[in-house]
Amino acid sequence: MSECLFCKFVRHEIPTQIVYEDEQAFAFRDINPQAPIHILVVPRTHVANLAEMTHEHEGLMGHLLWVCAELARREGIEPEGYRVVANTNANAGQSVYHLHLHLLGGRTMGWPPG
Ligand code: AMP
Ligand code: ZN
């Protein structure tokens, strides 16, 4: 069994604030939110990050983006806007190596990101 923290969330071995789950995707609230709404959307299957993606993951990634859009609607942040981020490897500050899309909203955001 994987020692990965997010795999343990997906398998319900460690409790977390789940906001959505289906056969392919799992979403939960970030423990250290960077915006009023900060949700992590992850695949149930372990993929480290975008750098590990193959053509086989294309459909899965499309689904994860749909989950982000759907949760943005449910959380009420769609009209004013939101951001989806996938930190990949060291320069981007990736700290957990199970692919996750950050869904951030509820405040205005700067550009470019830091
Ligand atoms: P990243 O730095 O892009 O790899 O994002 C990892 C995210 O996981 C960070 O925003 C953390 O706050 C979040 N995180 C780490 N541990 C937990 C946890 N136990 N529950 C929820 N979110 C977590
Ligand atoms: Zn994992």
Image (spheres, rainbow, N blue to C red):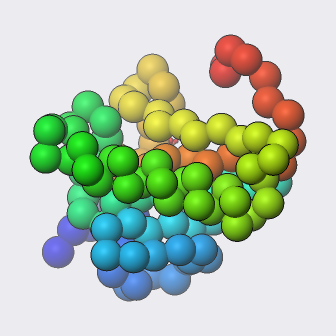
Q: Quadrant of residue 13?
A: bottom left
Q: Quadrant of ligand 2?
A: bottom left
Which quarter shows the C terminus? top right
Between 84 and 33, the residue placed more toward the observer is: 84
* Front-lying residue, 32 or 37: 37
Side of 52 where 23 appears, left or right? right
| Of 31 and 61, the residue lying toward us | 61
Position of residue 13 in the picture relative to residue 72 (left or right): left
Identify which residue, 72 or 112, lies in the foreground. 72
Q: Position of residue 111 (x, y in %)?
A: 73, 17
Residue 21 showing in the rendered view: yes
Residue at x 45% of width, y 81% of height: 14
Question: Does residue 7 appear in the picture of this structure?
Answer: no
The residue at the point 37 percent across, 29 percent down is 89
Residue 62's x, y, as percent? 36, 48
Q: Is residue 31 above or below residue 78?
A: below
Looking at the image, residue 66 sits to the left or right of residue 82; the answer is left
Q: Residue at 24%, 43% (x, y): give it.
A: 58
Is the residue 20 above or below the residue 100 in the image?
below
Q: Kindly give the residue lying farthest to the top in the view shown.
A: 112
Residue 43 horizontal side relative to residue 58, left or right: right
> From the image, which quarter does the N terminus lie in?
bottom left
